[in-house]
Image (spheres, rainbow, N blue to C red):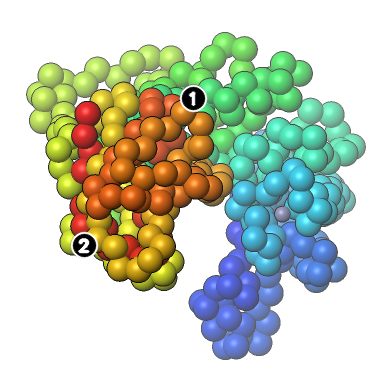
Amino acid sequence: MYVIVCGPLNEGLETDELFKKKVEESVQYAAYDVSEGYKKKSEELLKAIWKQYAEAFNNSYDEHLIFETLNEPLDNFHEHSWAPKSDCTVCKKDYAIMNEYNQLIVDTIRATGGNNAKRFIMVEGLAGKWECFTNKFYKMPKDKIKDRLIPTMHFYPMGSVSSYLCNFYTDSIKQSVKESFDAMDKVYFSKHIPVYISETSHSRFIPILERIAAIKGFMSEVTKSNRSCAVTLHANNDVDGSNDFFGYLDEWNFKWFDTEYLDTLIYAAEGKEYPLSAEFLKNNETKVESIVGKNLINEPFDTKKWGANYKINSDTFVRSVPESYKLEFVIKKTGSSPIIMITWSDENYQWHKIPGTAKKIKGGTLADGNVRPSKTTFTVEIDSETAKTIEDSNGLYLMGQDVIIQSMTVVE
Ligand SMILES: [Zn+2]
């Protein structure tokens, strides 16, 4: 068995109440941040931490002990912290600082000599995201010894926080996994550099057969013969679903949950397929009902001059609608200039609206992606491409002014 000792997690710093409380209560409670303003402080801390770790774990520990530089390091003070952008000045600066931190950590570990001079070190990029360690801004540290650095990342193909989970294993999830491995092929695998995925998992809130299909699909990419790749399952002991529900292992009672999911993962890692019993498949079938003809608004929604929004979970639209469909709205005007915005955000938190091209609206007109209704019943045509992006979004939101939306119904 191998043990990975990982550097610290990004603390929420000023955004996290718990962190602020710890700072107040503690004589010394420090954190690092990947930002220019916090650089000096962070470097001192990271150097001290890694010197301490590296001196504590050295010669008596052979190659079965691996170090990992940091856990999802990011710029807590920047709006793009979890999704750094390549055209943002601050993010570009943060990428450069990230490279410096990783270099500092590698140098600090190597300087302690002994087995640490040749120990494998896993190196993480901004936010632990694959996009951030396969782009041109990410640099692997320079090392005195050859082939001992392993780029590493975290990947939750169906979401990592309960409010943003996908409940269905969709084509777009499959596609995003493929996209990430294609990027890693280019930057790492083709150059015979291995990659370690130090966290992956699927929340137990997700229907089990969807999770099983997803981990199977994920592992089929991991285990392709031209790739040297391995994964750690993130099982966070949340066994009662009080938070994100990644509790596959009850660490206090040493009890495993959903062993079909775990066995699928373990078998797949060995290039085999775990046989699920007919009974298990039957008992856990994911049932989805058609929502055609259903009103998706629970009670009339007053837009209150852009002061409120109504969210419809994107899972609502998965496997429950035809490839293309219409949304039929029934409204009540409350002012002279009624507008309705239909909007959704994608996995990179980019907002989308009904595109201006080729979208047919009956009973209203489209202006800036918003609907200006001329009648109290209007329909918006959702073509198959738009339907896909809604299905893959973080939810559909309705906003607007001078109008109460009484119903929104999916019609064919
Ligand atoms: Zn930025």
Q: Work out how far the residue at label 1 is from the one at label 2, CA to CA, in angstroms.
A: 37 Å
Regarding residue 115, the answer to whether it shows in the image is: no
Query: Which of 293 and 71 lies nearest the eye of the viewer?
Result: 293
Query: Which of 342 and 84 lies nearest the eye of the viewer?
Result: 342
Rendering quadrant holding ligand 1 = bottom right
Q: In which quadrant will I find the C terminus? A: top left
Nearer to us of marks 1 and 2 is 2
Q: Earlier in the sequence, mark 1 or mark 2?
A: 1
Q: Residue at x 58, y 81 (%)?
A: 20
Whether residue 88 sits left or right of residue 201 in the image: it is right
Q: Circle 2 — which element?
A: loop
Q: Which residue is mark 2?
A: 300
User: Looking at the image, is 306 positioned above or below residue 182?
Assistant: below
Q: Where residue 23 appears, x then y in whole percent?
A: 61, 82
Whether residue 178 sits left or right of residue 212 in the image: it is right
**Mark drawn on residue 175:** 1
Amino acid residing under circle 1 = Gln
Whether residue 36 sits left or right of residue 398 in the image: it is right
Q: Residue at x 88, y 39 (%)?
A: 142
Q: Where residue 321 appears, x then y in whole percent?
A: 25, 31
Figure quadrant of residue 31: bottom right
Figure quadrant of residue 145: top right
User: Looking at the image, is 280 positioned above or below residue 95?
Assistant: above
Q: Where residue 337 appears, x then y in whole percent?
A: 41, 62
